[in-house]
């Protein structure tokens, strides 16, 4: 009998997990009765198999359009990090991107006058990042053995949804952050209007489309994760709505659905119901 990869709330709640109506191939998603965190019933063997996709030599190679979009997003995120750090630094702020893949954000930060480096557990991708001139370490953050309070900023993009024990990584991130340091993380919003309408059709829940996605946060559960690891929440921003994939609908039906989603994008941001969630945290004191 396969062993389920996650058997308790990843946020650290002791409440039971209840079955939801979001039915995936591996079974219905489970919900923490305390914080609403959703988790997959995927087996450990299937989870580990799906994670192998991240060490493929061709993984995460953007085309020109995607690369330009990433550069715009990186610029906005780096500007927000600088604003949160304030004018107290008289040197280049030191940043580490955890789970940095090919090191695109590391390169953007370096170009924006950060002293930037990354950590990536997939050996081939980490090697590709170094070959492209990015300062990237191979392995898990905990394996690097950085000294306390070494960094002004830590970024964690699309990582926490892969982890059954995110508190371990979050505590390590806080340990290496200086007092007043900033952490920026992104993940999907399981409390979004997209998730409510699309349910199992949302690709973010689908391991075969988004390898290794097993733990799904909402604004409340991500705030609890921050609180339980010693961070203060500076801001939680959600954006974008989607109600259908192009493969679900054709022609006019898809166009109408897309227009409806675009019309609801601003309200979704205001009410915290967008499916992209960007979280800015601050380390209030030494770890």
Image: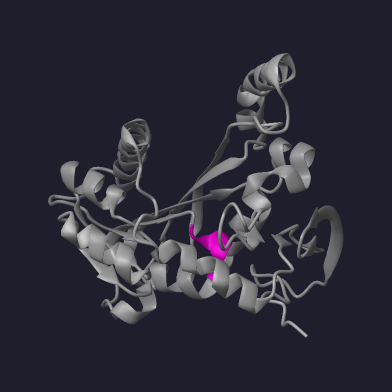
Answer with the quarter of the image where residue 273 lies: top right
Residue 124, image x, y percentages? 31, 67
Q: As rendered, which of 32 and 179 lies closer to the eye?
A: 32
Total number of numbered labels? 0
Q: As rendered, which of 33 and 241 lies closer to the eye?
A: 241
Q: Specify whether 156 is left or right of 238.
A: left
Q: Specify whether 253 is left or right of 146.
A: right
Classify 183 as above or below 10: above
Residue 280, image x, y percentages? 46, 48
Classify 272 as above or below 260: below
- The magenta region covers 159-166
Residue 169 visible in image: yes
Residue 84, image x, y percentages? 35, 44
Q: Specify whether 159 is left or right of 69.
A: right
Q: Which residue is drawn at 59% across and 48% down?
A: 188
Residue 155, image x, y percentages? 38, 55
């Amino acid at each position: 009998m396969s062993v389920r990869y996650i058997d308790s709330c990843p946020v650290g709640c002791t409440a039971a997990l209840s079955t939801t109506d979001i039915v995936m191939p591996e079974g219905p998603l489970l919900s923490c009765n305390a914080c609403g965190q959703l988790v997959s019933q995927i087996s450990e063997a299937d989870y580990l198999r799906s994670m192998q996709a991240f060490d493929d030599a061709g993984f995460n190679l953007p085309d020109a359009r995607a690369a330009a979009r990433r550069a715009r997003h990186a610029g906005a995120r780096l500007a927000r990090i600088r604003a949160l750090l304030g004018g107290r630094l008289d040197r280049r702020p030191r940043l580490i991107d955890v789970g940095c893949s090919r090191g695109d954000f590391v390169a953007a930060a370096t170009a924006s006058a950060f002293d930037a480096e990354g950590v990536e557990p997939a050996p081939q991708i980490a090697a590709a990042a170094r070959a492209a001139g990015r300062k990237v370490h191979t392995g898990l953050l905990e394996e690097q053995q950085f000294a306390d309070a070494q960094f002004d900023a830590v970024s964690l993009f699309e990582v926490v949804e892969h982890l059954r024990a995110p508190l371990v990584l979050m505590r390590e991130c806080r340990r290496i952050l200086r007092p007043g340091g900033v952490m920026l993380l992104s993940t999907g919003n399981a409390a979004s209007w997209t998730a409510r309408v699309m349910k199992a059709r949302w690709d973010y829940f689908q391991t075969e489309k988004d390898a290794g996605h097993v733990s799904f946060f909402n604004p409340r559960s991500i705030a609890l994760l921050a609180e339980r690891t010693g961070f203060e929440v500076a801001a939680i921003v959600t954006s974008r709505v989607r109600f259908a994939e192009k493969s679900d609908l054709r022609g006019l039906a898809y166009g109408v659905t897309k227009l409806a989603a675009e019309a609801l994008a601003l309200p979704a941001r205001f009410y915290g119901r967008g499916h992209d969630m960007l979280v800015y945290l601050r380390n209030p004191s030494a770890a």
